[in-house]
Amino acid sequence: MERQDDTVVSLRGVRAELGSRPVLRGIDLAVRRGEVVALLGANGSGKSTAVRSAIGQVPVTAGEVALFGTPLGRFRDWARVGYVPQRTTTEGGVPATVTEIVSAGRLARTRFGLFRGADRAAVREALERVGMADRAKDPVTALSGGQHQRVLIARALAVEPELLIMDEPMAGVDLASQEVLAHTLREEVGRGTAVLLVLHELGPLEPLIDRAVVLRDGCVLHDGPPPRASADIPPSSPLRSSRGYPQPGHDHVHPHDASGAAPIRTGPLS
Amino acid sequence: MDFLNYALMQRALLAAVLVGVTAPAIGIYLVQRRQSLMGDGIGHVAMTGVGLGFLLSASPVWTATAVSVAGALLMELIRWYGRTRGDIALAMLFYGGMSGGVLFVNLAPGGSNANLTSYLFGSLSTVSPSDVTAICLLAAFVVAVTLGLRRQLFAVSQDEEFARVTGLPVRALNLLTAVTAAVTVTVAMRVVGLLLVSALMVVPVAAAQQLGRSFAATFAIAVAIGVSVTIGGTVTSYYQDVPPGATIVLLAIAAFVALTALSAPPARRRARPAAAARPAAARPAADPAGCTIPATRGAAEEAGA
């Protein structure tokens, strides 16, 4: 068993409901310092709910959630956490520039919201790391989907977090921005930041990921090294039939895996 | 400029400037949260406070402040807890507030609905020195909150969930926004009137959105428009003997129409090079979030094949 103070995110037996529908049915999940964990699964498998329960945005009906070894109810050290929500809620009715949005991510490191030179420098640096420094004064409405996502990631990086939580950071992102995001994330991981991210498919982030947790119907189906295409998953495995993750007919997404000759084994599922 | 010599007019202009600053200052956060009509609801609730002032022979400005703050807090609590039937509860609050006002005014000795009219549509001749003192104190509170906590209020209004994860006291800030909006309603009550308060919170902001590219610029432009139309409307009503509230709101709408017409060509100019530069990227930007996942899937399939 890992030491408690080494674990940055810990979910134990977590159950959660949306409306009256059980979405999480006893999830165990741990992310250790410097580790990159991907949460995979079909739509509706509970992966977004799992990360949102980890940061207190979904009430937990049973089980324990802890951040940096502190139970969530008593956790106040939010400057250690950077959060990238699913890109839906960020366009308010009033114009705002890229810098104004990213500055909101720095508030946890300020006293009463007063910005000093170091805070402005951190915002600038966060924008440089996602390659958006030249758009700093542009209104966010003028950005493409991928650029918008890069701004949201800069907002999470502005606080200089030790833990980065991202909900579908690649959804609706063009290929150029996906490359930039993968590069940014690689740098961030190099600094020792732990990352917990929800992904629909591994994609360009695959080499970064230390561990994959696959959810299905609110339960953990797999927790171990990221499953590499069809080789690790026997045809009889429920993984194959679960909608969304490795789907039959989607194997060609990973054409580099010479999977045909591999023997059938239960691998990480055993 | 002979109107400046009258004490009455001096008071009215001071009150008008304070309304022009405070209403758009809190209104911009309400617009950002898509709660543009919250001011209207609070205005209805404040009528009970005005009626209570008449009944108790107290200053209607202070009783309206007390009742509208209570109403705004109740609205915010309904927003948290009573999600399913929230709109019904709000409707009861609004129309109950209005009816309470009419009832209390008519119960007051010698009171009739005529007393309410100056509070509903604004009136310059009735702004008393004690009203001006109250308006100054309340306006100072609104300015302190909307400027002093602008980063926090911006973050909460922009993305409430993200604000919670940055550790901001989101519930306290939401309650503070509601209280500040309620205070602004009573600041504006004497000049523009309870029924038209909401217009001055929303219309200058909508007009400023046509020009502003940043939140800070939009804030400054909205306040500038607010002050211009309240001064313009007050002076007009001095010469023409029309209610100031109606004049101010019509001027604000005129400013909105003029700025929309002025800003349309630059908006097209901005859009054209952007569209030409990235035809491929324009599609995901325009898509709603629900359609983006199939789009990515399609792209990955093409790349893999």
Image: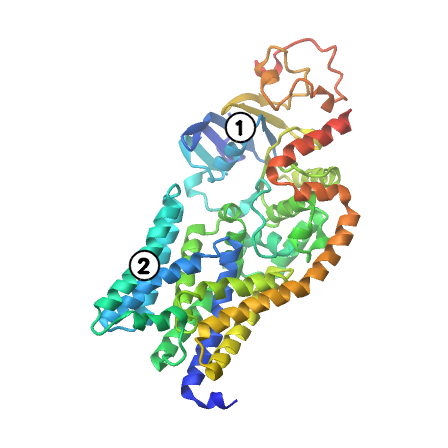
Task: Point out residue A121 in the picture as x, y percentages from the top left corner.
Answer: 65, 57
Left or right of residue A34, residue B148 in this image:
left
Q: Residue at x 50, y 23 (%)?
A: A217
Image vertical order of residue A258 relative to residue B206, above or below? above
Quarter-of-image position of residue A61: top left
> Which residue is rendered at x = 75% and y = 40% of the image?
A176
Dot 2: what SS?
Answer: helix
Rendered location of residue A122, percent (x, y): 64, 54
Asked if disc 1 and disc 2 are in contact, CB closer than 8 Å, the reply is: no
Residue bearing the label numbered 2: B97
* Identity of the residue drawn at 53% across and 55% down: B32
Which residue is the site of mark 1?
A44
Q: Nearer the viewer, mark 1 or mark 2?
A: 2
Q: Amino acid at mark 2?
A: Gly
Please state which of residues A190 and B160 is positioned toward the viewer in this rendering: B160
Identify the chain of the residue marked 2, using the numbered disc in the image: B
- The chain containing the residue under callout 1 comes to A
Q: Residue at x 36, y 47 (%)?
A: B88
Q: Kindly state the secondary structure of the residue where label 1 is placed.
A: loop
Mark 1, Cα crowd under 10 Å, few <14 / some 14-19 / many 20+, is: some
Residue B195 in the image: state x and y as whole percent: 41, 65
In the displayed structure, A198 sits above or below A101; it is above
Q: Is residue A128 above or below residue B52?
A: above
**Residue type, label 1:** Gly
Placement of B97 over or under A207, stated as above or below = below
Where residue A231 sits in the image (x, y, percent)?
68, 15
